[in-house]
Amino acid sequence: MDFETSILCTSSQNRLFSRSLIDSQPEDLDMWKKILYKKQAFPDNYVDQSFLCDLNNVNGESYSIQQSFFCTTAVTQEICCTCIFVVIFANLVSETLSPSFVISSSGLLVVIFYLFFSTFLDKTCYNLLSKGFEDLKSVVIFMSFALGFSSIMKTLTETISTDTVYAMSTFMFLVHLVFHDYGAHAVIVSETISINAAVFATVCLGSRLPNEIYTFALLLIGAEVFVLSPVPRRYIQAYIWALG
């Protein structure tokens, strides 16, 4: 037993001596190390400049200032289009803007952008007359249904207060902006939810206009701003991105 006890004592003394040697070694106080098992002369929340150097993001992509600017313009354009729609609605409610002017100007803008889109951007549209005739039929059908349902839309929210209608429209516009397709491949992007939210807000706001002609004019503006305008804007953005 004495021999075993002496061996245990000797081994324990050796461990203590080796630990004292390790503890007695001078620490480099100026050099921070990314380790947790050693006490360092730095606060617990200290992060050195070299901390991110060892992190490698495999899926990361670097963008230039020009590319970042073009990506940001897609968001600002949709926000501006939504604000323009709200301004047109406010002028229609106050009857400072004529619905005939809104209908004629929106129709002229649609014709101009359609010709520009079909001629310069859509390279597959070789037969402009035949495709234009088919699109014209679709426009006539849409306008007929919009004009026919304007009187029904006018009475949809009669039992709901105006403040509630404005609150629902504001929330739907926010949903539209959140789920809109800005060109990013993300899970949150849903063009269906975005368009449906914008159409719902348009119908709610259209029920607060003076008569059916005002409601019809607002429906046309809503279709142009939220359904038609994103198409040429995406083509233009892709064309500018390719140039850059």
Image (cartoon, rainbow, N blue to C red):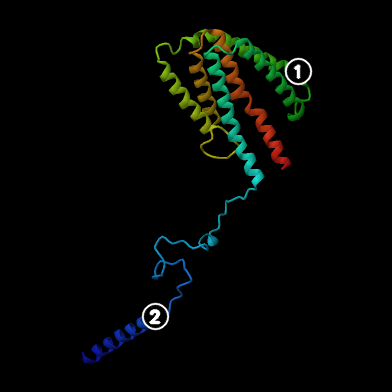
At label 2, counting other C-alpha atoms closer than 10 Å, the crowd grade (few under 14, some 14-19, many 20 or more) is: few
Mark toward the viewer: 2 or 1: 2
Q: Mark 2 points at which residue?
A: 22
130 vs 222, nearest the viewer: 222
Q: In this view, does 95 lie above or below 19?
A: above
State which quadrant residue 119 falls in: top right
Counting residues from the N terminus, which is met first, the one under dot 2 or under dot 1? 2
Residue at the image position 41 percent from the left and 70 percent from the top = 41
State which quadrant residue 120 falls in: top right
Residue at the image position 66 percent from the left and 16 percent from the top = 105
23 vs 102, nearest the viewer: 102
Q: Is residue 95 above or below residue 69?
A: above
At label 1, counting other C-alpha atoms closer than 10 Å, the crowd grade (few under 14, some 14-19, many 20 or more) is: few
**In x, y percent, where is residue 74?**
61, 35
Q: In this view, does 113 lie above or below 244?
A: above
**In x, y percent, where is residue 112?**
72, 21
**In x, y percent, where is residue 132?**
73, 18
| Residue 208 in the figure: left or right of residue 99 | left
Determine whether the residue tagged by mark 1 lies in a helix, strand or loop: helix
Q: Given the image, on which type of amino acid does mark 2 rest?
A: Ile
